[in-house]
Image (cartoon, grey):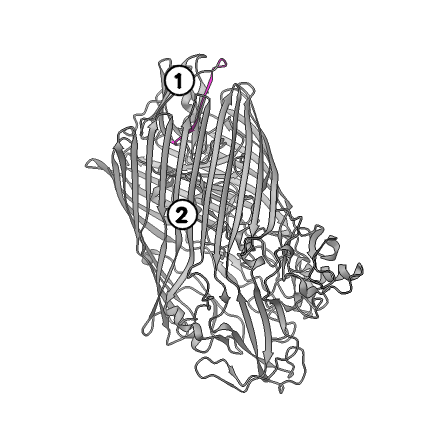
């Protein structure tokens, strides 16, 4: 859009040196996420006037006796500040304070090529904060999404590609499932598993803020970072634009294939992506302006897409097309200069058409035969209404209500046609039967459940700010309900998962001589769940004081009280915690009194809610069992077994029996939601008008972790030791929530008479490692503000992330069940679990910048270099572990059908050995250099942009993840006991190769 001033012509004062623009802004912030503030110095008793240069908003304030003034809760944007004949023009950034000095006259001109300036050192707050404007994001070669921009912040590393969208950021050692996301100050985090959020078209983003630590009492429900975006809005001048973005497959380097090293799978691949093709095409139109000048403004944006992808597998392939439009509508009503109302509406639904093919040859690189069409839909609609009122010069209030309605992935069409086809695998693990042709059928959904799984967040908040002398007092209340609908049914099409095995000795499921040596048998796996609607209620109240003691010192104190309430499908609470206190303390020392050197520190406690996925998984009925049979034949269509033996063989492996657990038994009655303490100490120093350096040390430590435990041996042994010989472990919930490593408070049916008794079981009975996670880091930064010619930002982070659990999700096993990983299901799973965690990247260097070659030409670069992640050895627990068999003679850790422990087979001895987490080396270092070239000539009444972004210029395709499962299988398979997985340490993921993004944009 048109800039406020022509290039090389904006006049600024020497006192505004600290306001010079930088590409990334590492400072501190006190304002609410969708707002900013102005503060500064002027003549005592004078009047300071501000006017928003886009909307005409005007406010006035009287300078205090000490010469200071503050304007809070301002819409971010460009402002003119005037007092005593001195005028400044500044930019207010999202969630940040901008300093303005009105005590000296204009004495210097600084050329900034049409960009207004803002502070790089905010001495009024203690938060760790990075802000990018839309213009800055355009000049950095970075992918066009919120996650990619968040990764530019110090201390952020890219999470595991198998979790969520694959591009989520991990902040400060936390898992990717512990962040908070906001749009215009409204929380849009999807807390079903914390791995998604309500998004918006990227061209609708005006500013993006990343809080990666030390945030104030206003914020909670996050242990990682907070990502907040501000949408564009209309002003007093009509502006519009259109853009096209094209990333062709012909300019993309092909991904890798990885051969399967298992002799039982000759001529196969564990990774087959070299033939995949992907082309992205999107186009946007947008515009905004005054409906009524100075009063009512509108901004609207529509985005169309035509993204295609061809995926090829061993015997099938799929063509994907995503083409559903997305959009945003923003309305702003300035009722008066002191009262405003704003509405934000977003639709970000995604529709993907899938055409599945059965390939004539293995690993075909073309689509063969006639395809079958299916449609997948998902995404959210967002509606937000907000009021802001400046009741007096010192008193400001705001109120907000909103709703996010998100639809989980829903499939219709041909993929449902095979729902009568059970899952069938042959002895060589190949997929057979109608389930595998042309594409596996979808699981059978409970016919009584709603047709779609949804998550609906309804929330409101109220904030008030009052300036009392040198104290800025802020407080507020927010409440949200989060309702998740989860349809039950079977996990498998056809209701069952059949797998054929060969018994070398004739033994089946521990029973000898069932079949002849070398004979076949079959395993039937059944997994079903009940349906329901599950509610989470989260409320919080906070109070904080920013005390500007004098010109040099600001002290901050805050207290947040969190309350969490998680309910089962019948509306009965099973986790309910009130008034969890989270204090925050901090200081900011303006050492020289001129914002050129800031020393700051903070200490705080942070809580995260229990995910609604926990409500679903912990309180619904779940059946998971495996039974073994002999058979006489196979169905010619489905390949399911015929002529099953009248009785299943051996003891059935029943992990969950399908009964609805009593809500009073599914969680420690004294459960402490997951919380963390954080300490930060740092400084920022302006070396000159052009350079700022910074450094800070960070310490984060989990106090109470939360996960589920699924063994009944602890309760059984405690009951026997205390004389309760009638206790039946079968009366327990299949799994329960607890704080690993702490005593457990539980209700149990001690006499098997249906009456529950509250008991306390010492932690030693569970034999679980204590839930631990610590993060220690040193961050260094160098910033060179953009001066009209070039700008640059660089950070280096040294860190260690160590503990017994990664967090809400588990990268090694690709588990997305927030707070319900396998980590603490049994005590033996925690043996050897303490070590360096998956998000531990010891060294991370980031640098990005832009250089204006000529008036109409610019280049940009972005570099991220990171050391590798630790590698573990994952396998099955040996029979020697105490919890191998449960109290019922089954359902112990030995029944888990997937490798879940740090015991793995030693290839030399053939025996399982404990290999501590993260001790099998690390993945290689990775480095990626991105570049940008843009031509931006004036054309008619607007400006044209023709731009190319080259991602991964050097085409580095290092390994980013390997197969960490070392054991081949359980002894119930055809494998020889003690056999090592031949694909252990084989690559599973790589850096994306070189690709190009071409942009054409015209704005007027």
Q: Nearer the viewer, residue 692 or 72?
A: 72
Number of marks present in the image shown? 2
- Callout 2 secondary element: loop
User: Where is residue 999 shown, x and y percent of the image?
Assistant: 30, 47
Label 1 secondary element: strand
Q: Quadrant of residue 789?
A: top left
Residue extending farthest to the left is: 940
Name the side, left or right, on which 490 lies relative to 329.
right
* Residue 264 position in % (x across, y down): 53, 76
The residue beneath circle 1 is 48
In the image, is 1001 to the left or to the right of 860?
Answer: left
- The span shown in magenta is 65-76
Residue 247 in the image: state x and y as whole percent: 33, 53
For residue 451, above or below residue 852: below
Q: Which of pointers 2 and 1 lies earlier in the amino acid sequence? A: 1
Image quarter in which the C terminus is found:
top left
479 is higher (above) or lower (below) than 630:
above
Quadrant, the N terminus: top left
Query: Is residue 923 visible from the viewing direction of this image?
Result: no
Residue 239 or 597: which is nearer the viewer? Answer: 239
Give the residue at mark 2: 199
- The residue sitting at 59% across, 73% down in the picture is 626
Q: Is residue 433 magenta?
A: no
Left or right, 894 with respect to 787, comes to: right
Relative depth, front residue between 236 and 597: 236
Q: CA distance from mark 2 to mark 1?
A: 38 Å
């Amino acid at each position: 859009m048109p800039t406020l001033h022509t290039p090389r012509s904006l006049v600024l004062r020497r006192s505004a040196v600290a306001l010079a623009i930088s590409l990334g802004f590492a400072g501190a912030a006190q304002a609410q996420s969708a707002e900013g503030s102005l503060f500064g110095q002027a003549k005592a008793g004078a009047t300071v006037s501000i006017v928003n240069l886009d909307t005409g908003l005007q406010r006035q304030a009287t300078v205090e006796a000490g010469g200071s003034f503050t304007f809070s809760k301002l819409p971010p944007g460009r402002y003119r500040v005037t007092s005593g004949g001195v005028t400044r023009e500044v930019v207010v950034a999202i969630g940040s304070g901008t300093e303005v000095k009105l005590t000296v006259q204009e004495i210097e001109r600084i050329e900034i090529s049409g960009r207004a300036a803002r502070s790089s050192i905010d001495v009024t707050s203690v938060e760790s904060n990075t802000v990018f404007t839309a213009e800055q994001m355009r000049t950095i070669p970075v992918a066009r999404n919120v996650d990619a921009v968040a990764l530019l912040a110090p201390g952020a590393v890219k999470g595991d590609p198998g979790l969520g969208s694959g591009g989520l950021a991990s902040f400060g050692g936390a898992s990717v499932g512990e962040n908070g996301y906001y749009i215009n100050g409204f929380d849009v985090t999807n807390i079903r598993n914390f791995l998604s959020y309500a998004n918006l078209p990227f061209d609708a983003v005006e500013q993006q803020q990343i809080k990666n630590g030390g945030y104030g009492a206003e914020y909670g429900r996050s242990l990682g970072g907070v990502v907040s975006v501000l949408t564009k809005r209309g002003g007093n001048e009509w502006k519009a634009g259109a853009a096209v973005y094209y990333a062709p497959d012909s300019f993309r380097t092909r991904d890798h294939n990885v051969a399967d090293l298992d002799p039982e799978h000759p001529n196969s691949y564990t990774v087959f992506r070299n033939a995949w093709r992907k082309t992205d095409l999107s186009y946007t139109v947008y515009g905004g302006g005054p409906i009524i000048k100075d009063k009512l403004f509108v901004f609207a944006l529509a985005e169309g897409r035509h993204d295609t992808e061809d995926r090829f597998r061993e015997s099938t392939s799929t063509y994907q097309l995503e083409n559903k439009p997305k959009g945003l509508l923003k309305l702003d009503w300035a009722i008066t200069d002191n009262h405003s109302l704003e509405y934000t509406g977003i639709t970000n639904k995604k529709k993907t058409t899938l055409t599945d093919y059965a390939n004539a040859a293995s690993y075909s690189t073309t689509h063969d035969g006639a395809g079958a069409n299916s449609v997948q839909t998902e995404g959210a609609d967002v509606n937000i209404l907000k009021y802001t009122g400046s009741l007096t010069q010192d008193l400001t209030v705001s109120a907000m209500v909103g709703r996010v309605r998100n639809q989980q992935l829903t499939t219709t069409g041909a993929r449902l046609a095979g729902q009568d086809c059970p899952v069938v695998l042959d002895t060589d693990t190949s997929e057979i039967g109608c389930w595998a042709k042309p594409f596996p059928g979808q699981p059978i959904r409970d016919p009584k459940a709603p047709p779609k799984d949804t998550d609906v967040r309804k929330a409101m908040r109220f904030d008030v700010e009052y300036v009392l002398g040198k104290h800025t007092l802020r407080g507020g209340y927010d409440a949200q309900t989060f309702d998740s609908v989860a349809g039950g049914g079977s996990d498998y099409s056809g209701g069952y998962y059949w797998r054929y095995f060969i018994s070398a000795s004739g033994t089946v499921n521990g029973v000898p001589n069932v079949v002849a040596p070398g004979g076949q048998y079959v395993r039937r796996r059944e997994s079903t769940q009940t349906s329901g609607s599950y509610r989470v209620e989260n409320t919080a109240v906070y109070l904080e004081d920013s005390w500007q003691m004098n010109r040099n010192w600001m002290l901050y104190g805050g207290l947040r009280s969190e309350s969490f309430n998680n309910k089962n499908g019948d509306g009965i609470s099973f986790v309910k915690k009130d008034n969890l206190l989270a204090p925050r303390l901090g200081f900011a020392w303006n050492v020289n009194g001129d914002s050129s050197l800031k020393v700051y520190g903070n200490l705080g406690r942070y809580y995260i809610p229990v995910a609604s996925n926990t409500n679903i998984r912990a309180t619904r009925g779940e059946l998971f069992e495996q039974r073994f049979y002999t058979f006489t034949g196979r169905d010619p269509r489905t390949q399911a077994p015929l002529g099953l033996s009248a009785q299943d063989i051996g003891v059935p492996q029943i992990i969950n029996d399908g009964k609805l657990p009593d809500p009073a038994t599914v969680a420690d009655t004294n459960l402490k939601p997951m919380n963390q303490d954080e300490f930060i100490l740092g400084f920022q120093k302006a070396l000159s008008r052009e350079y700022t350096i910074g450094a800070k040390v960070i310490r984060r430590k989990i106090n109470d972790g939360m996960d589920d435990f699924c063994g009944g041996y602890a309760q059984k042994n405690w009951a026997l030791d205390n004389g309760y010989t009638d206790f039946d472990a079968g009366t327990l919930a299949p799994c329960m929530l607890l704080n690993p490593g702490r005593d457990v408070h539980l209700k149990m049916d001690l006499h098997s008479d249906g009456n529950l008794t509250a008991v306390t079981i010492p932690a030693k009975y569970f034999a679980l490692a204590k839930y631990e996670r610590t993060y220690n880091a040193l961050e260094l930064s160098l910033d060179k503000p953009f001066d009209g010619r070039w700008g640059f930002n660089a950070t280096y982070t040294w860190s260690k992330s160590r503990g017994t659990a990664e967090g809400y999700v588990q990268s090694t096993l690709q588990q997305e069940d927030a707070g319900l990983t396998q980590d603490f299901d049994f005590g033996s799973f925690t043996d050897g679990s303490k070590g360096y965690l998956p998000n531990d990247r010891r060294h991370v260097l980031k640098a990005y910048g832009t250089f204006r070659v000529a008036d109409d030409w610019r280049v940009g670069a972005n570099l991220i270099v990171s050391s590798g992640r630790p590698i573990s050895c994952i396998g099955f627990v040996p029979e020697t572990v105490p919890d191998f068999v449960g109290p019922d003679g089954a359902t112990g850790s030995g029944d888990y059908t997937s490798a879940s422990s740090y015991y793995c087979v030693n290839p030399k001895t053939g025996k399982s050995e404990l290999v501590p987490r993260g001790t099998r080396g690390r993945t290689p270092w990775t480095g990626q250099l991105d570049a940008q070239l843009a031509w931006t000539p004036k054309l008619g009444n607007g400006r044209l942009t023709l731009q190319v972004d080259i991602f991964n210029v050097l085409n580095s395709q290092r390994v980013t993840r390997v197969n960490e499962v070392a054991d081949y299988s359980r002894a119930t398979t055809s494998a020889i006991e003690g056999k090592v997985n031949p694909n252990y340490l084989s690559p599973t993921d790589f850096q994306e190769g070189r690709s190009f993004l071409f942009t054409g944009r015209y704005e007027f």
